[in-house]
Amino acid sequence: MVRAIGIFIIGLIYQSDALATDYEFIWNPYCPYTCDAKLENGKEGVAIDIIRAVFKDSEHTVSFKRIDSWLRAKRLVKSGMSDGMAFTFYQHDKTENGYLTPETPMLMVKGIAYLSLPKNQMTPFRVTDVARFNAIGNYYGAVNSNRRLARYLAENPHKTIYVTGSNILKRVREMLDIGRIDIWLDSPDLLNYMVTKYPQYAVSTSATGNTEYAGMLFDESKPQSKALAKMMDEGIVKLRKSGELEKILARYGMPDRMAKPVK
């Protein structure tokens, strides 16, 4: 009888080990969302902190691989070389074809902002005010959910300089310094975080709001993707209810814009 119980327990242990998986997620340095910890006093970024918090009580383990190109990272996810992308922007009801995002985003981004030298600062600015600049920097493949801005960029390719590849934000700073671009369009959270480290630049925030969401990205065709998305959904809801999500965001100077207001 004792021998049978021992065999049963060993079987359960082996079964648990078989179910446990080490997932590897790709990340691209885009602080405060995904950060180079060596350059940020140990901070890995909001997205990586949230993922670690979601998985910490599960039987699974997670590891992260750095890829210095957002577009290449997406291709690696699609090719099956990675289990998912740690962070990307998207419009919540318009996930890219072939990809899957969790129903519950990690965070919400409100508004449009641009980084510039102080001489080009204009706060608040209207989207139409970007027309005054001769060289507008934008991330290649970025989501521009403001239709007026997206239309302007499409209609003025001679004014728009798209940047991709590695060390994008370092290159942006260099391009601003030499006058290659007048402004750099990006998330207000990211740009306000940047100027805490590089006060020689200024942030201009739009008076008109637009909304984008951010979270993980999976290959829709992989069987495990739905399970991972569900795990993230449930985990983010749990982190929000416990207050831990708010603490993670506050570490990077960001509010939880998806939290329900206290009555």
Image (cartoon, rainbow, N blue to C red):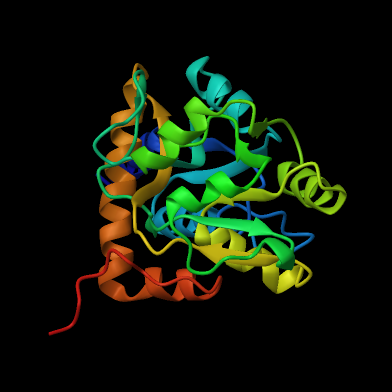
Q: Is residue 189 above or below residue 234?
A: below
Which residue sits furthest left?
A: 263
Give the x, y percent position of residue 60.
Answer: 44, 44
Give the x, y percent position of residue 65.
Answer: 66, 38
Q: From the viewer's perspective, tell me whether residue 139 is left or right of residue 146.
A: right
Between residue 187 and residue 152, name the one nearer to us: 152
Residue 72 seen anywhere in this rendered image of the structure: yes
| On-image quarter of the N terminus | top left
Give the x, y percent position of residue 114.
Answer: 58, 55
Q: In this view, does 123 lie above or below 107?
A: below
Which residue sits furthest bottom?
A: 263
Q: From the viewer's perspective, tell me whether residue 118 is left or right of residue 203.
A: right
Between residue 143 and residue 132, name the one nearer to us: 132
| On-image quarter of the C terminus | bottom left
Give the x, y percent position of residue 209.
Answer: 34, 58
Which residue sits furthest right?
A: 178
What residue is shown at x 46% (from left), y 58% (from top)? 50
Which residue sits furthest front?
A: 132
Q: Is residue 58 above or below residue 260?
A: above
What residue is shown at x 37% (from left), y 40% (from top)? 148
Q: From the viewer's perspective, tell me whether residue 166 is left or right of residue 150.
A: right
What residue is shown at x 54% (from left), y 48% (from top)? 130
What residue is shown at x 51% (from left), y 24% (from top)? 77
Between residue 45 and residue 69, name the one nearer to us: 69
Residue 41 seen anywhere in this rendered image of the structure: no
